[in-house]
Image (cartoon, rainbow, N blue to C red):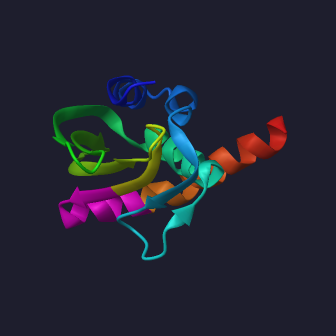
Amino acid sequence: MTPEAFQAALERGDIDTAGEMLADNVVFRSPAVFEPYEGKAATLVLLKAVSSVFQDFRYVRSFVEEHAMGLALVFEARIGTRTIEGVDFLRLNSLGLVDDFRVMVRPHSALEALMEAMVPAIERVLAEQSSAG
């Protein structure tokens, strides 16, 4: 899977397909908490939750860091009436898999709305997983 396919999968909310490009040891750094989330399973929970929270999610710009196997994807979305802008910073390992996924968002009011919406969204994803497993 290419970075462009990863981006397209995230834009359409196809987290399982995007997950194919995550390294097993991926580290997800959230704008809402200090400690990173480690591992593919935890990252997939967060991506599924945020895809259920964001409305009209789309990437609007991208930047490639040629020598360090990095990519920055600038996005826009809504959470209710709040518009959110952010950047996903992705680092790829030698196999081309995302092993570091950092998210920054603005403005602060949108971050607060995101944090408030994520708690029940994460609980829903975990409940769906436990009922399916």
Give residue 128's position: percent from left, percent from top.
72, 40
User: Residue 111 lies in magenta, yes or no?
Assistant: yes
- Residue 17 left/right relative to 88: right
Quarter of the image with the C terminus in it: top right
Give residue 29's quadrant in the image. bottom left
State the residue at coordinates (58%, 30%). 16
State the residue at coordinates (49%, 68%). 36
Q: Give the vertical position of 80 relative to 102 (above or below).
A: above
Give residue 129's position: percent from left, percent from top.
74, 42
State the residue at coordinates (39%, 25%). 2
Q: Nearer the viewer, residue 55 or 70?
A: 70
- The segment highlighted magenta reads 103-115
- Residue 101 left/right relative to 26: left
Q: Nearer the viewer, residue 46 or 71?
A: 71
Residue farthest bottom in this picture: 34
User: Residue 132 lies in magenta, yes or no?
Assistant: no
Give residue 57's position: percent from left, percent from top.
30, 34
- Residue 1 left/right relative to 87: right
- Residue 85 left/right relative to 49: left
